[in-house]
Image (cartoon, rainbow, N blue to C red):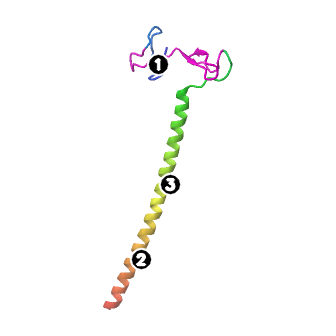
Amino acid sequence: MICNKCGSEVDKDKKYCDKCGSKIETNIKCRHCGEPNDLGSVFCSKCGKKITNEEDKNIKIIKRVAVISIILVILVSIFAVIVFSIYFASSVSACTKNCVEGCQTMG
């Protein structure tokens, strides 16, 4: 058998993984009818519906959150560049204007 958490090989008579300590699951319940099925089964042996693993759902959620986070970071970065550009452009033009006025009064 293989540990669901760390992937280590575990003897069939063991109830816990000797590498990570997690409980070794020998079956998975169908979320539709509650029938226990062998771990790794894709379809329920009683109702025939697809068995989905909670870890698969969690992985999909984590991937979605990661994509959304990356998109938000990119958008915030673009916004920061725009704001900085506007601020920097107005500061440079104000400084240039003051410099030109100062030079005209001196000369």
Inspect the image, locate mark 1, and give the three-letter code of the amino acid beneath it: Cys
Badge 3 is on which residue? 75
Q: Secondary structure at mark 1?
A: loop
Residue 20 horizontal side relative to residue 27, left or right:
left
Taking depth in this image into account, of 34 and 57 the one nearest to the observer is 34
Taking depth in this image into account, of 32 and 92 the one nearest to the observer is 32
Does 106 appear above or below 5?
below
Could you give the CA–CA distance between mark 2 and mark 1, rounded to whole angstroms? Answer: 65 Å
Q: Secondary structure at mark 2?
A: helix
Structural crowding at the residue carrying mark 1, measured as other residues with C-alpha within 10 Å and reported as few (<14), some (14–19) or many (≥20) = many
State which tag comes first along the sequence, 2 or 1: 1
Residue 14 horizontal side relative to residue 39, left or right:
left
| Residue 68 x, y percent position in the rendering | 52, 45
**Which residues are the magenta region?**
16-45
State which tag comes first along the sequence, 3 or 2: 3
State which tag comes first along the sequence, 1 or 3: 1
| Residue 54 x, y percent position in the rendering | 54, 27
At 48% from the left and 59% from the top, the residue drawn is 79
Quarter-wise, where is residue 88 in the image?
bottom left
Q: Is residue 67 magenta?
A: no
Number of marks present in the image shown: 3
